[in-house]
Amino acid sequence: MEWIFLLSGLFLGWSLGANDGANIFGTAVGTRMVKFRTAALVATIFVILGAVISGGGTTETLGQLGAVNALAGSFTVALMAGLTVTAMTNMKLPVSTSQAVVSAILGWNLFTGSPTDYKALVEIVGTWIFSPILAGIFAILLYFLVRKVLGNARIHMLQLDAWTRLGLIVVGAFGAYSLGANNIANVMGMFVFANPFESISMGGAGQFTGTQQLFLLGSAAIGVGIFTYSYRVMITVGNDIFKLTPILALIVVLAKSLVLFVFASQGLERILLTIGLPTLPLVPVSSSQAIIGAIIGVALAKGRTGINYNTIGRIASGWVITPIIAAALCFMALFFVQNVFEQEVVKREAVSAEVRTDIPEEYRITQNKQHHYTTINMTGFLAPCPNRHQSHGVVTGSLPAGL
Amino acid sequence: MAQLFTKHKQIEGEIDDFLDLIIESGLLFKKGVHFYLDGRSEEFEVRLADLRRLEKDADNLRRSIETKLYLRTLIPEFRGDVLGLLEHSDAVLNKIADTLLLFSVEIPETLEDMNELHYDLAHNAIDASENMVKAIRAYFRELSAVRDNIKQVQFSREETNRIAEKYKRDLFQRTNLRLSHKIHLRYFAHNIESIADEAEDVCDRLAIAAIKRYI
């Protein structure tokens, strides 16, 4: 039964793979610089690596926003986010999976009366605005750097073609890794607190935690999405806003991947902390938003010729509509799942965190985390407090009036 | 991946070989015209035979490059421009070979006192084709040099046109020649002149292709 609930997450992973795989290798495959099979294989391998190795950081932030702690609740949140993405895609409206997921979680918070960590919400929504801008800045800098390098280097056009192909694969691999690290939270983040997997001992190699198993499954679903459906998106992507050449595509994908990476890398966060610099929040950002920011950045650097402002307007409208639809759909669906199908969408029994083996180790209180978190509520579940130095208070768990 | 670089290097070499053939054809043409005007017909015929063989080799090489570029889907966004450039520069080579062939077939009665102008005409026309080749090489390797080379082609073409005009004026002001003779010689001057014109046409295409290559 538990496995059935995971299906909605896998569906969400599949749709993310179909759409965001195209963001990584779209122009490379569309212009036939890289074969689809090669692109899909590289993307799948690196999405899995990114998710399993570095997927924890963004998941933690998503968990702060709303810790969906019952499998039926997680199922509904993922399903409604996935349906929103699919419906918007079918309406040919560009859509952000991150926005759909975050909004669906907010819908769950609203339905179950769970508190919303507004600091985390502001961080996440802030990145929706900041990430395209940052991607644009990265793209402009990379554009001028590449132009200078190519202007000085006397590389034969055919050699440049070979290097560009290699670059597209390497940058695509980095993009896929960043996508896995940053966006696995969107796919499996809502299942982390209701994880059906137990840790597996790997002997001397340590533990293969339940969360990592969950991420492996989610990233495999992304891989299936890339293999089965992204080709159709790939051959049409990239030319709607601004026509991209393979070299410009390389710049755009690198800029986007850097943005996803800086918002996902715990290693980078540690380095910044060590040298006393402010850190960036580890937040699942929208790869679609980042790539659009990067494309606009490149177009501006080239002198603003050829930007399709109508398409940008259409995309921006999608960014406003998606959160509203996802939150509303999730709220309504939770009502049906709870009252019609009689499934538990939120756990309310008091269970001590110390005895809850289904809570992943990294989300349990530790000596190091104790100053950030506070034991909370009647569910016995640990959630990070809104302001990392204050208590959440008590979760009442009451349903909205009339339900 | 190493195989990918090897394949690219091989086609790069073939393009360079093709452009070398255009340069070589120009040199053979100049020699051929000299020998014809000097009345050394045997040596002229040897050069013409070399030039015709070379024209055939260039055609084969061009087809091979085009096939490989398509089959291996190389330089997808510039392939059309590159194929256009190769085909049109091959047309310049064909024009060079055809013009020299006309000397052999029609055996024009050239005027000794106008030989100097004829040499100049041939030299300037071939200068235009040689500078065209330099511009094409720059298009592949050093974009910033394309403009300079195109300027040189334009200069050579203007110079060729000027010399051709002078040649034709001199020719038609002569009263001791039959009109048919004058028209025949004018036809040869016109053919040599059109080598430079074709080279300039290639460079016009090249200028647009170069703009597209700037990222």
Image (cartoon, coloured by chain):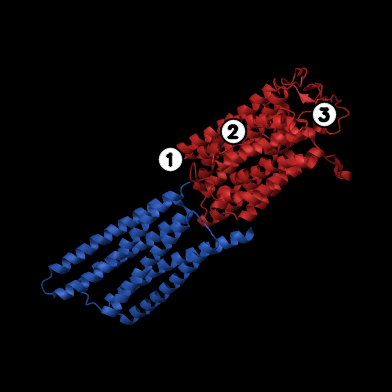
The hue of chain A in the figure is red
What is the spatial separation of the Cα atoms under label 2 and label 1, in whole angstroms? 29 Å
Give the image location of residue A82, x and y in percent: 65, 39
Q: What amino acid type should be assigned to the residue bearing mark 2?
A: Thr
Q: What amino acid type should be assigned to the residue bearing mark 3?
A: Arg
Query: Can you identify the residue that label 3 sits on?
Result: A364
The chain containing the residue under callout 2 comes to A
Nearer to the camera, A225 or B44: A225
**Chain letter of the blue region:** B
What is the spatial separation of the Cα atoms under label 1 and label 3, in whole angstroms? 52 Å
Q: Is any atom of residue A1 visible in this view?
A: yes
Query: Can you identify the residue that label 2 sits on?
Result: A322
Q: Tell me, for residue A168, which label it has, or none.
A: none
Q: Quadrant of residue B174?
A: bottom left
Query: Can you identify the residue that label 1 sits on?
Result: A305
Q: What amino acid type should be assigned to the residue bearing mark 1?
A: Thr
